[in-house]
Image (cartoon, coloured by chain):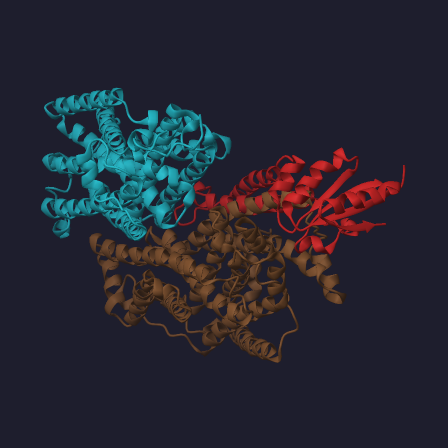
Chain colours: A cyan, B brown, C red
Amino acid sequence: MNSTMPSVQAGGDAVPQRSLFTLGAFLTVAGLVAFLAGLFGPHPQRVWQAFLINFLLWSAMAQGAVLFSAVTHTVKARWADPLSGLSEAFAGFFPLSFVCFLILLIGRNHLFPWLHADLHGKEIWLNIPFLFTRDGIGFLILYGVGWAYLSQDLKLKLRAPGPAAGLRRLLAGRIPQTDADLQRVQGRKTLWGGLYCFVFALVLSLIGFDLVMSMDPHWVSTLFGAYHFVKAFYVGLGALIILAAIIHLRRGSSAGLAATHFHDVGKLFFAFCLLWADFFYVQLTVIWYGNIPEETHYVILRTVTPPWNALAWVVFIVCFIIPFVVLINRRVKTMPHAMIILCGMVIIGIWLEHLLLLGPALNHEAAELPLGLTDGFVFIGFMGLMVLAVAYTLKTFPELLPPARQGAR
Amino acid sequence: MTDLTYAQIDQTILNTLERPRPRYWFFVVLVLCGVLLGAGAWTYQIFVGIGVGGQNIPVAWGTYLINFVFWVGIAHSGTLISAILHLFRAGWRNPIARAAETMTVFAVCCAGLFPFIHLGRVWQVYFMLPLPNQRFLWPNFLSPLMFDVVAISTYLTVSSLFWYTGLVPDLAVVRDRSTGLRYKVFRILSLGWSGAHRQWLNYSRGYLFFAALAPPLVISVHSVVSWDFALGVVPGWHTTIFAPYFVAGAIHSGLAMVLTLMIPLRRIFRYEAIITVNVLENVAKTMILTGLIVGLAYGTEYFIAWYSHNAVEWESFRWRAIGEYAYGLYFMIICNVLLPSLFLFKAVRRSIPWLFALSLVVNFGMWWERFVIIVGGVAHDFAPHAWGLYAPRLVEYCVMVGSFSLFFFLFLLFCKHLPSVSMTEMKETAHHAG
Amino acid sequence: MPDETFIMGLFKDEGKAAKVILELAAAGFSFRRAHSPIPSHRILEALKLKKGRVGWFTLAGGIFGFFTGFALAIFTAVQWNMIVSGKPIVSLIPFFIVGFEFTILFSVFGNVIGLLVCSRLPDYRGLETYDPRCSGEHFGVLAACETGRAGELMDFFQKKGGEVKVFA
């Protein structure tokens, strides 16, 4: 391990290989083809629904994953340090997410049920220009702060520009040389990290209200925004665990990730599983108990009426019951294969949950679930985009990978 | 904190258990008078009737409920500090965990009194117990008030057991340094604890499980308390955000009470080396988070009240801002969100006077938040002809004074007779650092 | 049975105490107990003890509590057997709250019982072979030997750097 080639040393054989990029590109193209086919087919509304659901899900994953690093840094939880780089790598998806958000504008006629409805005064909030402006600004601020945070952390992790000097120099800027410089960068990192947490809560609440709750414009739930950002952290942690597990499996025990890291992040995942279920239950109980028709129609449609009731049970079992029962066991959290399967399952569960929330609003009087192959392909397409984004970020900044343990074979 | 030896830790804390000076007894008697005042007022209410309080139609829930929620809220951050931070392995909690857990137990005791007081005919409280009676009437567990019974009694039991379990090794330390009557009492209380390896092995496991069971309890208990309001259909009450909002608010007010108690405590008992400014600063930092959550909840409620275009809901929030109790809303926003954000400045959160002042401000603001929610909700609900106002009367003020006095009375007794900082946990901190 | 003497070696350093435990058997003495003012991982490692069994008590309590909570709520609701507020007589959504609280309550009871049973507390008799310094800054290692070898054991402890206390 000579110190003259730091960027090769960092990461080692966990740096994404070309095959990964090929896979990512292939998945993306598959999704794109399915999306375009659906767009020019008889039911463009279906494929726009799939696009919205996946946009929300994968953006939430990226936003939540980056939050892990921001939160653990702000509370000075040292145990999370090896994972923080992996968590920040998800920021590579941010530009793609923003582009996808703008693409939503194209499908607006198929996406927003309130577009031509009489909203009795709500139009000043629910109209396309205002909605896209405020949400766009929200995303820009969130992603900007996220990248500022990433940039400060890169300043601390990078030792030399290395290959792909352009982007690295752009993001990392001047590497701190003196102790005073280091202090300043640390301070800024804490500031941007704290800001990210704050903006995360605000922007994801806004997105939850604007892009999910408003699909049924006459229904409200004050907790819905917070529910959305808790969901985002839940799937973000899941994505982070999958990434960490894959890297651990590729690199073996010389990776900087020990069983304790997996155990700790697994416990956090379990905690957010409980918190997600709690936020879900809290809304359900208040609405059920008050029994006010303005509120209950939304819940009844999704939990009691076929075809959605079956989906509701599936979501509950996949997103709560199974992870709860499995993660009570201590050892499971440290088994990478098991965690990949479990977290993958939860991600699919939350994907279905988005369908449960949005589907009835976008498909009135549906006789059967609007879930088909096209939806699957669009999911895969977004997965490809995420793979490309994270792989590219890790390839450009291998320092984000957990530092190899000293003296390990 | 890290350069304290075990002996120094023991000595500093055991010194606080020495014979108290007359000044101590003066304060004890003072708060005891407050307790008696409250007890007297309550007795008067029992004999004359609940109507001596200010509650009436439409505001049937007044300061008794406000204080109930206030005290339960205070209790929660004690559990946060002693249990949840234990799970996070946050060492800075060790100096204040004992006092925080004690605060929890006493606060739940005070809180638990209020449903009795509010009941009026307190002899009928046994109706809530699931016992068969001659008319085959059972309590209805569909009611949020019954959830309260179950939740608060569970919380009191669990907190007390957690508190006592945490105390046992320290009681052994006091026993080993005592003679005479104190030796005999602590010998019994410490259950013969000798720090044997088998005892520590199982104790650590048991304590870990306590710490793991406490967070779900904290969240569920204050959610249940919030559902006393949210499960009704009153505008301003019937909203899904209440459960997490109340939990965050509870922790916010509880952390403020921790500061209010710890700052004088460390001065009087000369705990400066143990309860360092770093510890207090960390409490303040946590309050930044809880203050922001509470602020987000305020904003969301207002936004959704407008967004819902529900005339009754919007009227309730419009009146909240410009009606007869509007000052309560501004106390709430300024004291709970704006002023605590001063903690963002390092100088403020490391300054003892500022910490103490802001802790009082937050406690004041959180009391007013409960006033705005509870009284403001029912005072101005659906039909205009049913709108009305409420003002507490003398009996209620006396009972409130009594409850605060009871809390401080119990806490003062605790400080002088039981170790107010956990010697065992301090030694563990010193051990891991040294 | 030969007369046994109990002697406790008191060490200010945890590491020394852990080493002494490992060397006691080799020296032909019988280890009885180790006392410490704080939970000591090194001593527990030296003793190669398995994790405590308290968790099973907690789990049993929790399961019992879960079903008891629901049972209580369902039983009382079915006794009255009338629709209240338009809610079904047996409504699982609100009854879950009762079940949840009882789960926690009985888990804690199980936890406390498990703690007492597994630690064998209260144990006032154990205080007869206990030195109060063990709750202060000393780690105590209690060993037993035949009365004739008491001097040897005392030397053993003192050579390792500890103070000695003899119990009759």
Counting labels gives 0
Pinpoint residue B21: horizontal percent, then vertical percent.
62, 77
Name the residue nearer the viewer: B38 or B176. Answer: B176
Compared with residue C118, is residue A37 higher up or lower down, i.e. above or below? above
Q: Is residue A273 visible?
A: yes
Name the residue nearer the viewer: A331 or C57. Answer: A331
Name the residue nearer the viewer: C18 or A32. Answer: C18
Pinpoint residue B66: horizontal percent, then vertical percent.
42, 65
Q: Is residue B146 visible?
A: no
Question: In the image, is C39 to the left or to the right of A378?
Answer: right
Question: In the image, is B115 to the left or to the right of A307?
Answer: right
- The residue drawn where x is 14% and y is 24% is A38
- The residue drawn where x is 72% and y is 52% is B192
Image quarter for residue B65? bottom left
Question: In the image, is A224 to the left or to the right of A362?
Answer: right
Pinpoint residue A338: horizontal percent, then vertical percent.
43, 26
Image quarter for residue A105? top left
Pinpoint residue B431: horizontal percent, then vertical percent.
57, 50
